[in-house]
Amino acid sequence: MDVLYYWKDYAADLREGRIGYFRSAREKLDELQQRSPDDIWVVKTPPGHKGQLQLLGRLVWSDLPTTKVTAPAGDSLIHYQAGHPRSVWFDEELALQHCDEVTAWLRAHHPGSLRANFQGVNGQLALEQSAAQELRRLTASCPSQPFQKASKNA
């Protein structure tokens, strides 16, 4: 099982060094952890493309913190391994050209999240194995670079 995470403020987070974690509601985090996720696929809505998704990268889930950070009151944190070889950042220009495919994929698997504009728990989704395999096929030929390198260049 994998996770899809809508990373609205990714550019600011990378610039400010907020790497290795995402905010989450405790209930949602518990639900995801119980299913032992492998990877987190991160997406965003590109500027000027309302209703579409751009696939940013794939990050390796971690059950333990990978950085020193304290969750804000009332929040929990999803952790990921930024330096893991499987944590990658996709070429943003090429990913922008494939928004239609990624959006169609999401509509087929989680149509309610698009309608809910990824608000709250609609921005953190469990991906069944078949859905995750489709994403892997979609991205198999996409140029990528190690996430840690990409995050330093942001």
Image (cartoon, helix red, strand yellow):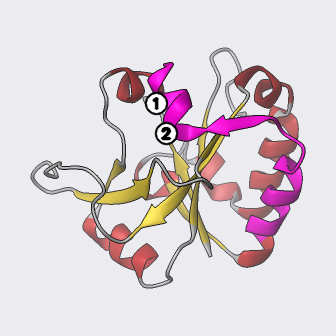
Name the one closer to the observer, 140 or 41: 140
Cβ atoms at labels 1 and 2 below 8 Å apart: yes
State the image quarter where residue 86 is shown.
bottom right
User: Which residue bears the numbered disc 1?
Assistant: 10
Q: Which mark is residue 134?
A: none
- Which residue is found at the position 74% from the left and 66% from the top? 132
Residue 79 placement, left or right of 132: left
Q: Amino acid at mark 2?
A: Trp
Asked whether residue 54 is in view, the answer is: no
Q: Position of residue 69 (x, y in %)?
A: 17, 48
Question: Among all residues in the image, which is located at the extreme top?
Answer: 48
Q: Residue 46 in the image: x percent, y percent?
A: 65, 23
- The amino acid marked with disc number 1 is Tyr
* Numbered disc 2: secondary structure: loop
- The circle drawn on residue 7 is 2
Query: Is 150 colored magenta in this rendering?
Result: yes
Question: Magenta residues?
Answer: 131-154
Residue 108 vertical placement versus 63 (above, below) = above
